[in-house]
Image: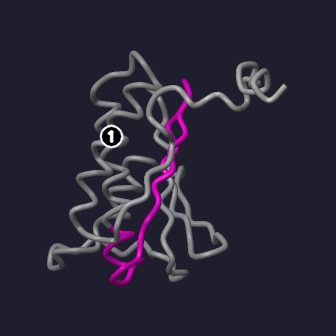
């Protein structure tokens, strides 16, 4: 009987097809490159036929979120989690980190070298991004609308 259970396992238990929707990263600056590769592969597979510009926009959004999360939402030894969801209308990027402190949009300044991440995010995803509390920190998310 056990053998039959293994051979006739329901579809709900089948392994997912294609790149997974979640990536766990070390809270280190080098992790941004891994996030870019992960997002590029996920979007290209799960949203076939979209333009390279669309894929690169989602990659840029993810990279900004991951970089901000690592810079402001982690301490040494912490991790961040990237969660993706895509359909024909949009691609959602979430980045979870362990710090509850919320990022804030700062005025544009030509004198600072940093602090432009949310300005870029707001330009690429106007009105389609936000911050939510999660059990062990926060999730910063953005949705890139499909062309």
- Residue marked by disc 1: 57
State which quarter of the image contains the N terminus.
top right
Name the spot of residue 7 as percent of width and height, x first: 71, 20
Q: Residues within 10 Å of mark 1 (few under 14, many from 20)?
A: some
Give the side of residue 94 with respect to residue 44, left or right: right
Range of magenta residues: 68-93
Whether the magenta-drawn stretch holds residue 72 is answered as yes
Secondary structure type for disc 1: helix
Identify the residue at image location x=28%, y=60%. Answer: 31
> With 119 as the anchor, is 114 left or right in this view?
left
Residue 33 placement (x, y as % from top left): 23, 53
Please tell me which residue is depicted at 32% across the width and 36% down the height of the picture.
40
In the image, residue 49 sits, relative to residue 142, either above or below, namely above
- Across and down, in percent, residue 116 comes to 28, 67
Q: Is residue 51 magenta?
A: no
In the rendered view, does 127 fall on the left or right side of 75? right
């Amino acid at each position: 009987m056990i053998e039959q259970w293994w051979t006739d396992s329901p579809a709900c238990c089948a392994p997912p097809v294609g790149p997974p929707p979640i990536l766990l990263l070390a809270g280190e600056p080098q992790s941004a490159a891994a996030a870019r590769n992960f997002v590029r592969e996920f979007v290209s597979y799960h949203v076939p036929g979209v333009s390279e510009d669309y894929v690169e926009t989602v990659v840029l959004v993810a990279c900004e979120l991951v970089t901000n999360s690592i810079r402001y939402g982690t301490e040494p030894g912490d991790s961040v989690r990237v969660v993706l969801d895509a359909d024909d209308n949009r691609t959602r990027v979430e980045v979870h980190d362990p710090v509850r402190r919320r990022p804030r949009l700062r005025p544009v300044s030509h004198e600072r070298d940093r602090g432009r991440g949310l300005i870029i995010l707001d330009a690429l995803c106007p009105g389609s991004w936000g911050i939510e509390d999660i059990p062990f920190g926060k999730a910063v998310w953005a949705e890139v609308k499909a062309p």
